[in-house]
Amino acid sequence: FFLLFLEYMSRRAPLQLYRKSEIGSCLTEALDELINTRNLPESLAWKVMEQFDQSINDALAHKTRSKVSVNGQLHTYRFCDNVWTFIVEHATFRTDSETIQADKVKIVACDGNSRT
């Protein structure tokens, strides 16, 4: 059972990538508050988070057309469980209309086609 659970969770991990984003964190805090005040059952909060995972991934895959280029010094990279992690120092992000610079960024990327 435990091995099946680990396999299931490793397949779900890419879907849960955006829970640590600003909007994902805000949703998590709001759901925690509703659970703590007994206005929302925990089981429903889990369903909301699962729907968030699916919706944010679908929206980013099908409803965005922006392209971003990244330049900087690659400090560290790692590939584990079909997920790439890059640490980039002195990073510059460029779009058609904007340039953003950062001292250090962590980029996590996974194959959006490998969802199950």
Image: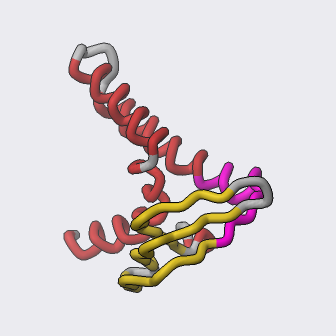
Name above or below for residue 89 compared with residue 64: below
Can you give x and y, in whole percent of width and height, for residue 106 in the image? 41, 67
Residue 26 on image: x %, y %: 41, 33
Q: Is residue 8 above or below residue 19?
A: below
Locate residue 40 relative to residue 95 in the image: left or right: left
- Residue 25 location, x and y as percent? 38, 40
Is residue 62 covered in magenta? Answer: yes
Residue, x 45% and y 83% (percent of image)? Answer: 74
- Residue found at x 73% / y 61%: 95
Q: How is the image coloured?
A: secondary structure
Residue drawn at x 39%, y 50% as measured from the top left: 20
Identify which residue is drawn at 58% across, 76% down: 71
Give the residues drawn in magenta, as a range. Answer: 57-69
Give residue 6's quadrant in the image.
bottom left
Question: Which quadrant of the structure image shows residue 81?
Answer: bottom left
- Residue 42, given in percent of the width and then of the height, sits at 29, 31
The mark total stands at 0
Q: Is 17 within the magenta?
A: no
Q: Taking 103 as reference, is 94 left or right?
A: right
Decide which of 16, 45 is in the foreground and name it.
Answer: 16
Q: Is residue 58 above or below residue 102?
A: above
Q: Quadrant of the N terminus?
A: bottom left
